[in-house]
Image: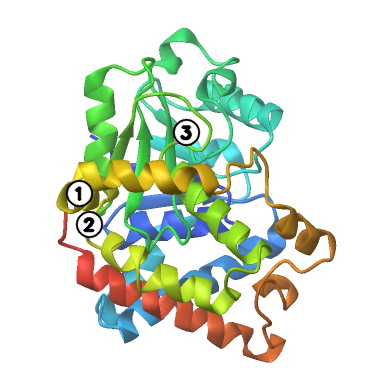
Amino acid sequence: MIRKIGVLGAGTMGHSIAEAFAMYGYEVNLYETDAQRRAVVKEEIRQELELLAEEDFLPADTIPAILGRIRLFADLRPAVEDRDYVIEVVPEILKLKQELFKTLDEYCPAHTIFASNTSSLSLNPMMELVSAARRQRMTVNHWYNPPHLMPIAELSFFGNMPEEIYREVEKLYQSIQKQTVKVLKDVPGLVANRIQQGVAREVFSIIEHGIAAPEDVDKALKFGPAFRYATTGQLEVADFGGLDIWCIVGDNLLKVMDNSPCANSLLRQKVQAGKLGVKSGEGFFKYDSAKVPEIKRQFMKRLIHQLKASTYYA
């Protein structure tokens, strides 16, 4: 049974993954090499928990206990040597992950399950330097940002892991209220990111061709397809609409829609111009730097409201 969790990396994703496990009673060792990051991460988690309490998602008096379940480590061995499950959230560099898993294979007990939060690297190359026995206990477990709010976890089942070990990982995620997606093939982007990129490709293309302004494109998505997607999957939408209708519309529309095999040129131009979105003050929209903290807070609050509405929806 998985009880002791290790999270490697306390950045944007890692600290939130640790927070998610701690919220549901798990003891979490959070490893981070950057001393400046270690100095501030607990306060960042505390603020996120306080926002959850403010929105009545969790009792405020549980926050100290949640924070107490997260222990910070600067050294790898003590952070992982007694863990049942270790997930890495380090930069997407294959060699870095290979060496990390090799070291973990030496430091961790034989029963420890290793996971990667990668969304762009294949599992087989990441397992290259570990023992044959450990390869049966390695998996891709991909979270969505912010992990403590987004209720999805994509779990790999690529043929290296026995069914009973997969079920153990699946139960772990279900115990922290995640909706698990079993991914059967090792493909780039897994499932959710491939769907998201399909939508994004057409959205960027519509703007590039001047079909609608950015604010109207987002409005069309939020109050059109995405409104249904909050509670209804695409295949269910298709069944309700009639597969014959979807077939006809597909024949009519797909041939005139974007089928580019690379990032949209408008998107690339904005990146080259340094217009990266909220973090630079401008992307498709402009952001007042003084208002960014509140903009992010409101973004989180919207996700919390949606999470509260959908927690028990499957």
Q: Which residue is mark 2?
A: 232
Q: Nearer the viewer, mark 2 or mark 3?
A: 2
Q: Is residue 109 above or below residue 83?
A: above
Element under label 3? loop
- Do the residues bearing badges 1 and 2 touch, measured as CB atoms within 8 Å? yes
Quadrant position of the N terminus in the picture: top left
Residue 199: x and y in percent read 48, 53
Q: Mark 2 and mark 3: span between their CA atoms?
A: 42 Å
Q: Nearer the viewer, mark 3 or mark 1?
A: 1
Q: Residue at x 38, y 36 (%)?
A: 85
In the picture, measured across the screen, residue 175 lies left or right of residue 131, that is left
- Toward the bottom, the furthest residue is 290
- Do the residues bearing badges 3 and 1 touch, measured as CB atoms within 8 Å? no
- Do the residues bearing badges 2 and 3 touch, measured as CB atoms within 8 Å? no
Q: Quadrant of residue 210?
A: bottom right
Q: Is residue 87 above or below residue 222?
A: above
Residue 250: x and y in percent read 38, 44
Q: Which residue is mark 3?
A: 81
Q: Is residue 289 above or below residue 300?
A: below
Q: Which residue is mark 1?
A: 236
In the picture, measured across the screen, residue 304 lies left or right of residue 12, that is left
Element under label 2? loop
10 Å crowding of disc 3: few (<14), some (14-19), many (20+): some
Q: Residue at x 34, y 63 (%)?
A: 225
Amino acid on which disc 2 is placed: Thr
Amino acid on which disc 1 is placed: Glu
Residue 32: x and y in percent read 61, 51
Q: Is residue 222 visible?
A: yes
Q: Is residue 5 visible?
A: no
Q: Earlier in the sequence, mark 3 or mark 1?
A: 3
- Toward the right, the furthest residue is 273
Residue 259: x and y in percent read 58, 42
